[in-house]
Every structure is written in structure tokens, then in C-alpha cells.
């Protein structure tokens, strides 16, 4: 009986040893699996950033292009407002001409005061001299004076000269 108990103990010890060894293998396997998952995660993050960097450069370039286009648009809008005012005044439509001229002067003042203005320093000072004629021009239009058409045409020619358009010189 002692022998049987001893054999039984030996078998139990062997089973425990096998179970411990199995647990060690499972622990090592799970550690290996965690390491592999970590490597995959790092590779995925690396690939993400490799794709993100070129997209960031493209987005930055597009933002710069957008800013330049918006500056050009502001200058063109000012010119369009003044031309519209001059044409309306020539046609004898003084109220729409007055509104367009008023909008021109307001937009021009705003552009001069902007930090990211589309105008350089010389253009700003030239536009300032044109803004000095605001009250007189608006008054002529409010009175429906035909002289307003000539005044607005002169303002338009002066505006183009300030911006450096050679066709107005």
C-alpha cells in the first residue's frame, strides 16, 4: 500500500510538473503574442504617419493657394464695385451707383486695415488718397448729379493706376 501511495504521489507530482510546465509555455506563448501585437501596432502607426505627412504638405499648399486666391478676389471685388458704380452713374441710375460706390469705399477701407492685405504699402497709400474723395462722390450720387459719372470714372482710372494696371495710364 505504501508503494501504491508513493506511486500515486509520484504520478500526482508528475501531473503537477506537467501542468506547471504547460502554464509556463502558455505564459511564454501569450508574452510572444503580446509582443507580436505590439509590433503590428507600431508598424500600423508608422504606416499611418507615412501617409499623414504627405497629406499635411498637400493641405498646407492648398491653404496657401486658397489665401492667395482670396486676396486676389478681394482686389477684383473692389474693382468690380467701382466699375459697377461708374457704369450705373453713366446710365443715370444714381441710387445703385451710390450703393456700389459706398460698398467700394467700405471694402477698400477694410482692405487697407487688414493685417493680411492683398495690397502692398504703395498701393495702400494710393488707395488712401482715393478714399479721400468718398464724401464728395457719395454726395454727388445722392443728389443725382451727372458729374458723378465723370468723378467715378476718374476714381476707377485712379484705382487701376494705383494697382499698377498699365491699360489705365
Image (tube, rainbow, N blue to C red):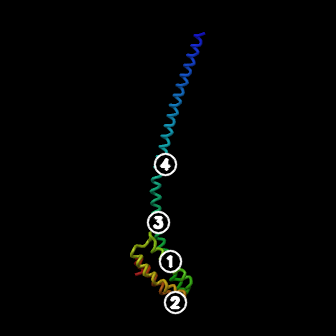
Q: Quarter of the image for the C terminus: give it.
A: bottom left
Q: Relative to 68, is 29 above or below?
A: above
Q: CA distance from mark 3 to mark 4?
A: 28 Å
Residue that numbered label 2 is attached to: 146
The residue mark sitting in front, 1 or 4, is 1
* Residue at the disc numbered 3: 67
Quote the CA–CA distance across marks 3 and 2.
40 Å
Query: Tag 1 or tag 2, which sits nearer the N-term?
Result: 1
Looking at the image, residue 27 lies above or below residue 125: above
Position of residue 144 measured from the top left corner of the image (x, y, whole percent):
55, 88
In what element is the residue under mark 3?
helix
Between discs 1 and 4, the one toward the N terminus: 4
Q: CA distance from mark 2 to mark 1?
A: 23 Å
Relative image position of residue 78 (x, y in whole percent):
48, 76
Q: Nearer the viewer, mark 3 or mark 2?
A: 3
Question: Residue 23 or 159: which is nearer the viewer?
Answer: 23
- What residue lies at 58% left-to-right and 10% top-to-bottom? 2
In the drawing, what numbered circle is on residue 48? 4
**Which sits earlier in the primary sequence, circle 3 or circle 4?**
4
Q: Which residue lies under the disc numbered 1?
A: 106
Kindly give the residue lying farthest to the right in the view shown: 1
Image quadrant containing the N terminus: top right
Q: Nearer the viewer, residue 27 or 163?
A: 27
Q: Residue at x 44, y 70 (%)?
A: 115
Secondary structure under tag 4 reads helix
Amino acid at each position: 500500500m505504501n508503494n501504491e501511495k508513493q506511486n500515486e504521489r509520484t504520478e500526482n507530482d508528475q501531473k503537477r510538473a506537467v501542468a506547471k510546465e504547460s502554464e509556463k509555455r502558455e505564459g511564454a506563448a501569450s508574452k510572444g503574442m503580446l509582443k507580436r501585437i505590439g509590433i503590428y501596432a507600431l508598424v500600423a502607426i508608422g504606416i499611418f504617419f507615412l501617409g499623414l505627412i504627405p497629406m499635411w504638405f498637400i493641405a498646407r499648399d492648398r491653404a496657401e493657394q486658397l489665401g492667395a486666391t482670396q486676396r486676389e478676389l478681394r482686389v477684383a471685388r473692389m474693382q468690380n464695385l467701382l466699375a459697377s458704380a461708374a457704369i450705373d452713374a453713366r446710365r443715370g441710375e444714381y441710387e445703385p451707383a451710390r450703393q456700389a460706390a459706398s460698398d467700394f469705399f467700405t471694402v477698400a477701407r477694410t482692405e487697407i486695415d487688414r493685417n493680411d492685405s492683398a495690397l502692398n504699402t504703395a498701393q495702400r497709400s494710393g488707395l488712401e488718397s482715393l478714399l479721400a474723395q468718398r464724401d464728395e462722390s457719395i454726395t454727388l450720387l445722392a443728389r443725382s448729379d451727372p458729374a458723378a459719372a465723370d468723378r467715378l470714372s476718374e476714381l476707377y482710372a485712379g484705382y487701376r493706376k494705383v494697382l499698377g494696371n498699365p491699360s489705365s495710364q
